Image (cartoon, helix red, strand yellow):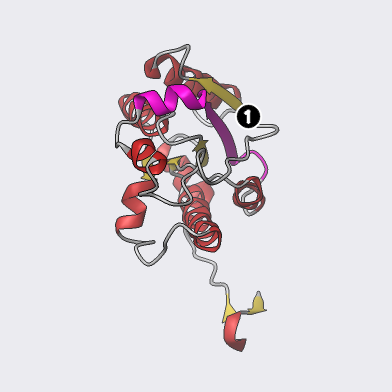
Amino acid sequence: MKREAAGGRNLTWHHHDVGRSDREGLLGHRGATVWLTGLSGSGKSTVADILACVLHDRGVLTAVLDGDNIRHGLNSDLGFSPKDRKENIRRIAEVAKLFTSFGVLNILAFISPYREDRDFARSIQGEGDFMEVYVEVPLEVAEDRDPKGLYRKARSGEIPSFTGISAPYEEPTAPELVLRTAEHTAEECALEVIALLERKGIIAGG
């Protein structure tokens, strides 16, 4: 399969002898992407870490991609303008697609404020491979938690274009799951995701 790419380069997609089904057979579960989206302080990273621990104990190979960690390396060249936010999510979406194709259950914790960008992340994956999980929390609760002191800085003008304060967050319209972390513990929320994965046939029932 050949396609024109940026700069007029002629690229050929190479099909490898060991494919996704081979890897999934080896691992004993399907590859998939769990995309956790929500405001800063909503609990995305906490839920992702607990979820990864539970899955690891059940023999499921996982990878956790977290917003701050990705910006330390892969996306260290990007800022927080709308254009850079879009590119940030585009790159992450492509990495998630690769992990899924490798049979890994990858868990992503990103604010990812724009609906269009999350829809793109879904569109490049196969049917049933992508699950959008909205980690919902009232702004006042997230701001009260403020684990990194970011809301305080945003309110004082130290951080421009901060999601929820001076930049928009577009709530998902049809996520596979909504986690309400103001009402449930992070452990309970992680178990809700486990139940979703079981219903979807991504992992075997416990």
In the image, residue 66 lies at what x, y percent? 37, 44
In the image, residue 12 lies at what x, y percent? 58, 78
- Is 9 on the left-hand or right-hand side of 186? right
In the image, residue 176 lies at what x, y percent? 63, 29
- Is 121 on the left-hand or right-hand side of 63? right
Residue 167, compared with residue 87, is above or below; it is above
Can residue 142 be seen from the camera position used here?
yes
Residue 204, compared with residue 83, is above or below; it is above
Q: Residue at x 52, y 23 (%)?
A: 138
Q: Residue at x 64, y 53 (%)?
A: 120
Q: Which residue is under mark 1?
A: 176
Of all residues, the one furthest to the top in this rendering is 183
Identify the amino acid type marked 1: Glu
38, 13: nearer the viewer: 38
Looking at the rendered image, the quarter that the C terminus falls into is top left
- Is 3 on the left-hand or right-hand side of 18? right
Picture mark count: 1
Of all residues, the one furthest to the front in this rendering is 156
Question: In terms of image quadrants, where is residue 80?
Answer: bottom left
Q: Residue at x 61, y 51 (%)?
A: 117
Can residue 58 be seen from the camera position used here?
no
64, 100: nearer the viewer: 64
Looking at the rendered image, the quarter that the N terminus falls into is bottom right
In the image, residue 131 lies at what x, y percent? 58, 36
Question: In terms of image quadrants, where is residue 201?
Answer: top right
Local crowd size for mark 1, using a 10 Å CA cut-off: few (<14), some (14–19), many (≥20): some
Residue stretch rendered in magenta on the structure: 127-145
Tell me if residue 36 is in the magenta stretch.
no
Question: In terms of image quadrants, where is residue 11?
Answer: bottom right
Q: Secondary structure at mark 1?
A: loop
Q: Residue at x 35, y 36 (%)?
A: 152
